[in-house]
């Protein structure tokens, strides 16, 4: 019961806003971004790009999102997402599985978590997403470049397309 309560509270902090609210960056994203020294609006824009889901409040990141071999899946609960993730791990190369609000790649970054389902914990997922953004910024000295390379570290056209998607979300966010 305590785990379910913590998960519900994390979800509320990370994505739930009143129906009348404009696109505001939730406090949980602000805290994670501050710890990693990344702009909160950029971290939130990346999460919107990676796991955005249409909710009554508008598009919001959804913590229980999987992308397997290019196909997106969203689940109502962390438990449902974990069960699906465990099944996908048996049949799919881990480098083709992205998990959670930041869509952390299981093959490239799963070693940061004890189990695949641990990637579904919203805060640790976003903490690693923020760390990855920071690492790309430290190398390239550009937040837009860091955003593009978050998706495609080698750069090029895939990074450019992704960067454009993130910048589109940034236009609707406070700085």
Image (spheres, grey):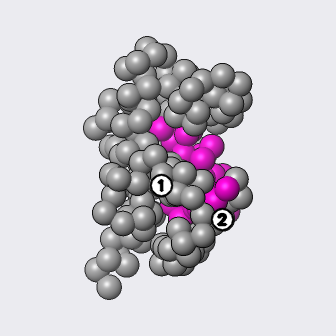
Q: Which mark is residue 120?
A: none
- Mark 2 or mark 1: which is in front? 1
Q: Which mark is residue 106?
A: 1
Vertical placement of residue 102 versus 46, above or below: below
Percent x, y for residue 47? 54, 46
Percent x, y for residue 52? 63, 52
Is 68 contained in the magenta span? yes
Vertical placement of residue 38 versus 93, above or below: above
Percent x, y for residue 154? 57, 26
Report whether 147 appears left or right of 4. right
The answer to which quarter of the image holds residue 40 is top left
- The stretch of residues the image draws in magenta is 43-69
Report whether 112 appears left or right of 133. left
Report whether 72 appears left or right of 17. right
Is 57 contained in the magenta span? yes
User: Badge 2: few (under 14), some or many (20 or more) residues near its Cα, within 10 Å?
Assistant: some
Report whether 29 appears left or right of 96. left
Sequence-wise first label, 2 or 1: 2
Task: Say what secondary structure mark 1 lies in.
Answer: helix
Label 2 to label 1, Cα distance in Å?
15 Å
Q: Which mark is residue 73?
A: 2
Q: Given the current orientation, which residue lies at the most extreme bottom position?
A: 1
Residue drawn at x 70%, y 53% is 70
Residue drawn at x 32%, y 30% is 37
* Image quarter of the N terminus: bottom left
Residue drawn at x 55%, y 39% is 46
C-beta proximity under 8 Å, tags 2 and 1: no
The answer to which quarter of the image holds residue 71 is bottom right
Residue drawn at x 42%, y 22% is 137
């Amino acid at each position: 019961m305590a785990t379910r309560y913590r998960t519900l509270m994390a979800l509320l902090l990370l994505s739930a806003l009143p129906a009348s609210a404009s696109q505001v960056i939730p406090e949980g994203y602000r805290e994670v971004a501050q710890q990693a020294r990344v702009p909160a609006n950029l971290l939130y824009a990346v999460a919107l790009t990676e796991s955005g889901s249409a909710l009554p409040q508008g598009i919001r990141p959804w913590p229980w999102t999987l992308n397997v071999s290019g196909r997106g899946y969203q689940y109502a609960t962390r438990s449902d997402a974990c069960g699906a993730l465990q099944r996908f791990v048996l049949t799919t190369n881990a480098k083709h599985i992205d998990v959670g609000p930041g869509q952390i790649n299981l093959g490239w970054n799963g070693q940061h978590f004890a189990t695949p389902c641990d990637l579904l914990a919203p805060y640790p997922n976003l903490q690693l997403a923020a760390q990855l953004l920071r690492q790309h910024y430290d190398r390239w000295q550009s937040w837009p470049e860091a955003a593009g390379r978050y998706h495609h570290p080698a750069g090029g056209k895939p990074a450019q397309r992704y960067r454009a998607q993130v910048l589109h979300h940034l236009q609707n966010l406070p700085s």
